[in-house]
Image (cartoon, coloured by chain):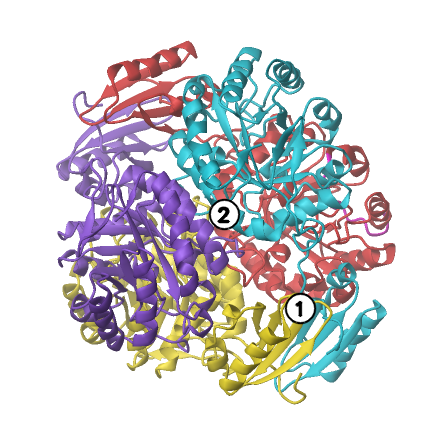
Chain colours: A purple, B yellow, C cyan, D red
């Protein structure tokens, strides 16, 4: 193997691979401008490939006859990796901060239903020390017969409420055709779990100048989440907040399985802030506080939770929204852990 | 409970629920125009609710104090259910059929790379008896550094190849902004696994007059797949082909876990044709044939497989594409099982 | 339906079920000594069954022609449920406590390897305030070629180390033939994840007078864990500590996915103490501290972690064991969160 | 790297690893009698280790400072691998065969309930061409309140029924203390999914002279299943039949997710016969036939299905047992596929 550069890929040939098969792989690597170092062994031959990583990983080497396995050595993400940017990124919006020493406390109703409901929720969460207001205008719903959000009308409500409370607005973008309208109001643009691998939408967000809150897909690995963020970053926008919100598993006692281990891993892998959505993971409100506290304790850079003046009248996700009149206590309890962790509310 | 209508929902109150809490639920149901029948028991009270199902299921009853559980009685999907349409639907395109007695054999390259490559693959699959040509123009890729498809150029190649071979074209639509261009060429519009819950895109397809091939999401349940189809059907387009393509599980020996049990369930739940994509599930070509045969044996209405003239040069999914020169044998072997099942190639 | 007792089961008949099919179900229920109340509706008939729950749930009612669904109303576990025993159980062993206000800090090597290694670890964890010593004598290993534990020899080492440090011993029992030997030394008998549904072993533990630490199976739901505990409790031993240690999911960034939501659910469902094993879930030591802190914050009653004087020489689980010389800092950091939660080290 | 032997392990050092850290790893390898070849690169250093594989894989190399990743080159299983034994193994019992060209058709009741019920089922399955009789004496049940099997009494019923029908008996062993009693009757000893990693029980079976039917654990990977078989083989008993019976996933439309892709993989990895249990995977009888046919088509060496004279009276698994009077049709339909696959009923 090379003496002064490390391979990007190790290609392990099958036990019975012929010399010709090995040469074919080497020839293809050369063609692609890569260097190949062959190590022949008792039972297997290993080829180390050195070159442009993007190019190397795009070669379909596993399809070559005689190839057993292709092992990448470097991580597939770059711009979002901590190796690239060792210092934690802080995302700012209207003076509020998330990342590094700053903990973001994002709260608000699942859906924007009326001006009154949204304003009432916003006042409560602002008073309790929240740093941003969440509120859904466009709602992805499993059933076409469920409430789909107020759309553009909700955006205008959010703008009004921001004026009255000063809270920056976090709201979801579901469709590239809505970019302009959403951009007109949103301070942070949320990409929901079901759109985490909507790659054209991600690229679109990479070309705008606005922080993005990217939720982990229901069955996306930590690596896939980072690659989704890389889509945004590659186009030029590195103001990305990652969000763990629970994954699909066999367990049905909670709506999704909140993966706080993934948060701990993300904190070692990326410089981007990582927040947690305990509301959607839990699916029932009595679990939201313990999970929010756990999120703060595991090292998350913030939480995003659902709050409603009257959850029993909510048009979506009623069972998991925190009643507005309980939110001050909720926030106080979470802030205790944040303080213990040596952080400040951003 | 009511004597002449069945409840749509059963609401089970908690052991310690007060009479007032029960009354609140009943009042809300009445408000919503539903009838409620209360059964008080030793340890729990059960309320049966009769009314417009869409309305009932949109009520956030689980958020009411004292409510233990809300149990829906009817299935949440309607238009796509076999109860609604007892006879199996047959989808036709340019004279080829999928559904009921007709088995669809869809084959072609993962990505359209060049005119030559696509034409070569198309000729081989046509000669072997395939009924449609697949070929990706827009490619959803985990990494932004991977080949993303030729886009519009690929569409034009597909149109040419159709002219030369007569095979109807199946190609993926990823973005609502491409509807017109894709519609211009595609005979069947594919929605990929990562877009199965891109609800606005689904609704868009509900308003066009073209069959849709809807792939199951990587972590979507059978019920969620049917609800996604319901989004399309609700807007007026009931020409939908469902596709099982493997789900995410802990197992890594295959790329995804092909869920043929889901195919068997779907055949009892819906009148829509159900096909299987063994290529993406397997992730390696030696498993594609056994899985394709198993798909035919479990009762699938077709398969969609990847074929490439030279998989080792493929720009995507090389390891799982069947070499074109092996496809005739492959097809013959699958057709044996199709024939045993009493079906014909459509 | 009955007016003064609640049904244990609701049996929903299919849309097209005949009167005779309904009568057959009712007849079977009567035979079994249960009362049945029939409610006929527009599209479905519902039968409420009242009687001995054990008996009712053992009837194979779903196999009867015409039956759509059988819905149990009551929880399947009893003795371990909070409804049965509203006050939290405190487990004591040699003066150390777990449960209610008492947080258990269990630490020690994965495997007992030598007297020196075990004693060294024990002294360090005792000095740092641990309440019990863990150490594996019998080791369940995926490969038959891996170190399988010292067995009986390890038990004798553990007895010696307890004498020198005073720490109660937690060690795993894998086989009913070892009950006597393990009972001779263990203060708390651990049942590993792979034996959670070894029902005859569970029953054996139900007949002894020693606390049991029952780990959740790798693919066991919260309900299955509680049913496993019910096996022990049913035989008479209610001194059971439950342990969340990560479940199998598609995510490979951590060895298992630690399910802290399950801990929050368990705290509402059962009176038994619930602890967390962050070491096995993480599989790498740098994640153990954040997950241990999160466990304390979510409301767990304790943690069990792996500590080794020289992890790089460990015969099992080296990558996840905390080096002994870092354990004092580790413990201090966890205790901060325990204190914030208003609890004391037991 | 070595020129004439292939490495068993590749140890990839971290980007910032020091020369000393690399030397420590090399020193440890030497100590363990292994050869190490170091390749220093631009961003990483890779060490290839050659030596006794068992020893190498037992070294906790990932715990060494500076180590990024340890990549094994050889498969961890040996005795059960196809590389070791290229020809497929045929298991015989009382003249019936499973493996290679022989397809095993194992059928019978879930539980042995009475002599009459068992005999009735046995006669029906024998008449329809089954090759072995299944019947549970010891039943692993999730709830302690469910029927646990007749135990020893069932074994004696099975012995009588074998005398009357000539069918070899397949029955489950749950506990090492029952080995002698079960061995006294069983022609094939079944290890259930929940005991697949009961390693001491597996070793016990390795020391007896009787075929073992080893079911895949609910969350066990293909590799873990093969390692469990390796436990049996290592002790000397290589007459092992592997069985896929569905894994735990998020999907609830079937009781478990039948993983036929795993069957296809197993057929390439091991010389042992691989059968499929569609009954437990499906959980409902209407899905058993399509899944059984799919199992035959994917290349399984047999199936094991549940048959009961009167499923509606069954003491366990009623919903999934095939009524005895439908079994002849069922078997005929499966045999059609078996014949198409070029195999014979063993």
Asked whether residue B278 appears in the rendered view, the answer is no
- For disc 2, the neighbor class at 10 Å (few under 14, some 14 to 19, many from 20) is many
In magenta stretch: residue D168: yes
* Residue D14 screen position, x and y as percent: 27, 26
Q: Which mark is residue C70?
A: 1
Residue visible at 68% across and 72% down in the picture: C11
In the picture provided, is D319 more to the left or to the right than D59? right
Residue under label 2, please give it: D262
Asked if residue A140 can be seen in this view, the reply is yes
| Residue D267: in magenta span | no
Image height of B63 relative to C322, above or below: below
**Image side of residue C163 versus residue B211, left or right:** right
Q: Nearer the viewer, mark 1 or mark 2?
A: 1
Q: Chain of mark 1?
A: C
Above or below, comparing residue B329 to residue B1 in the picture? above
Placement of the N terminus of chain B among the 4 image quadrants: bottom right
What segment is highlighted magenta in the picture?
D163-175
Q: Position of residue A90 (x, y in %)?
A: 20, 45
């Amino acid at each position: 193997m090379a003496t002064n550069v490390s391979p990007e890929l190790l290609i392990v040939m099958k036990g019975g691979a012929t010399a010709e098969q090995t040469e074919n792989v080497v020839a293809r690597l050369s063609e692609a401008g890569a260097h190949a170092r062959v190590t022949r062994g008792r039972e297997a031959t290993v080829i180390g490939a050195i070159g442009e990583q993007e190019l190397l990983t795009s070669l379909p080497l596993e399809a070559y006859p005689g190839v057993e396995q292709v092992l990448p050595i470097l991580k597939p993400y770059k711009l979002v990796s901590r190796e690239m940017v060792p210092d934690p990124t802080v995302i700012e919006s209207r003076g509020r901060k998330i990342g590094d020493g700053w903990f973001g406390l994002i709260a608000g109703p699942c859906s924007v239903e009326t001006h009154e409901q949204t304003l009432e929720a916003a006042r409560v969460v602002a008073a309790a020390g929240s740093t941003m207001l969440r509120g859904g205008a466009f709602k992805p719903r499993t059933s076409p017969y469920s409430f789909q959000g107020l759309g553009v009308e909700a955006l205008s409500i959010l703008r009004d409420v921001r004026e009255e409370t000063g809270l920056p607005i976090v709201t979801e973008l579901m469709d590239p055709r809505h970019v302009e309208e959403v951009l007109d109001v949103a301070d942070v643009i949320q990409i929901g779990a079901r759109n985490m691998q909507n790659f054209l939408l991600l690229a679109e967000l990479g070309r705008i100048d606005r922080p993005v809150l990217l939720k982990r897909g229901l069955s996306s690995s930590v690596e896939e989440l980072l690659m989704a963020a890389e889509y945004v970053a590659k186009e030029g926008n590195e103001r990305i907040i990652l969000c763990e919100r629970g994954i699909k598993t066999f367990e049905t006692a909670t709506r999704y399985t909140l993966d706080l281990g993934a948060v701990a891993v993300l904190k070692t892998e990326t410089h981007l802030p990582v927040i947690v959505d305990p509301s959607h993971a839990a699916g029932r409100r009595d679990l939201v506080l313990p999970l929010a506290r756990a999120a703060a304790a595991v090292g998350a850079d913030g939480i995003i939770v659902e709050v409603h003046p009257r959850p029993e009248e909510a048009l979506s996700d009623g069972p998991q929204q925190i009643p507005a009149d309980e939110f001050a206590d909720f926030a106080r309890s979470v802030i205790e852990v944040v303080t213990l962790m040596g952080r400040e509310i951003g």
